[in-house]
Every structure is written in C-alpha cells, then in structure tokens.
Amino acid sequence: MATFETELSPSPSSSSSSAVTEIQSLMDDWRNALTAKDLDRLIQHYDPAVRFFDAVPPYEHQGATAYRRTWENMMPFLPEALGSEVRELQITAEGNVAFASCLQRLTNRKNNEAATCGWVRVTLCFQRKNDSWKVVHEHVSVPFNPQTAQAAFVKEL
C-alpha cells in the first residue's frame, strides 16, 4: 500500500507509488478543468454511476450526469477568475482502489478571497477500470457544531 501526504516526503513502493502519482495527476487535472470551467474535462474522470454527497442541496447525487448538472448550476455564482486551493492532501492506493482526502476551497483569483463558504472537507474514492482511474464516490462536507446544529465554516487556515 502506498500513501502520500503533502506534509511528508512520499516513500511508497512500486505499483502503488505509480497509482498515487496517477491519482495526484488526475486530481490536478480536475482542479485545472474546474478553474477553466471545462465541464466536459471535469467529469471525464468520473464513473458513470458515481455516488456524490455534497455540502449543498440536494446533498446527494447519483451518476456523472447529475454531478455535471450540479456544477452547471453552480457556475453562474462562481467568479470569472475561479481558483482552487488544496491543503492536507493524503492519497492511499492499493491494487485497483485508491482514496484521497483533503481540505479544499474555491477562490476568486483576483483577490484570493473565498468564492464560496470557505474550506470544505473532500474525500474521493477511486477504482481502476480498464487501466483508467475513475472516481466512484465523492463526499464534500462542512463540519458542524452539534450543540447548535450550525455549520462550522473555516474561513482561513
């Protein structure tokens, strides 16, 4: 099993190391597609039956078409100069399965301010299918305070 953490130097082994590198590249391509607002490229790494839990309504989606629709609905509310930051990225891969988790925020590149609520938690589950990694599950969430039932948005890290 290979694990990559952004704070640590990766020391994974052979095929798992290659898988971690492939996943990191795929995630970079996703971010570049998002900031370019290229929805065709954005969803190309998703399995047609992906299950997606989101931090915004309707909170759960099934399938790449629904995933794309979510981004189509969000685009009018995002800045023209859209940016994306990732922190605390961890990738683990073994065989045909990989997992990645991180903190992410969308920004306005003109002023480097948050373009949405601030930092969100993201977990991605990948499966290698026909020699290609596909996202089969994605979960985006915001922590909440159980005493007040209020979201605990983190504006800056």
Image (cartoon, helix red, strand yellow):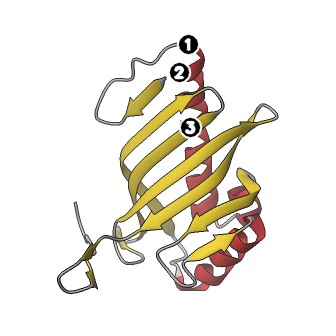
Q: Residue furthest front?
A: 147
Q: Point out residue 44 in the picture as x, y percentages from the top left corner.
A: 75, 53
Measured in 3D between alpha carbons, the distance from the residue under mark 1 to the one under mark 3, in whole angstroms, is 15 Å
Residue drawn at x 46%, y 37% is 91
Badge 2: few (under 14), some or many (20 or more) residues near its Cα, within 10 Å? many
Residue 156 vs 41, above or below: the answer is below
- Quadrant location of residue 62? bottom right
Label 3: element kind: strand
Q: Amino acid under label 1?
A: Ser
**Residue topped by disc 1:** 14
Type of the residue with mark 3: Ala
**Extreme residue toward the top, this view:** 14
| Quadrant in the picture for the C terminus | bottom left
* Residue 115 place in picture, x, y as percent: 42, 76
Dot 3 alpha-carbon crowd within 10 angstroms: few under 14, some 14 to 19, many 20 or more: many
Residue 96's spot in the image, x, y percent?
A: 66, 31
**Residue 17 tag number:** 2
Q: Which disc number belongs to residue 98?
A: 3
Q: Earlier in the sequence, mark 2 or mark 3?
A: 2
Residue 3 appears in the picture as rendered: yes
Q: Quadrant of residue 109?
A: bottom left
Query: How far separated are the C-alphas under marks 2 and 1?
Result: 5 Å
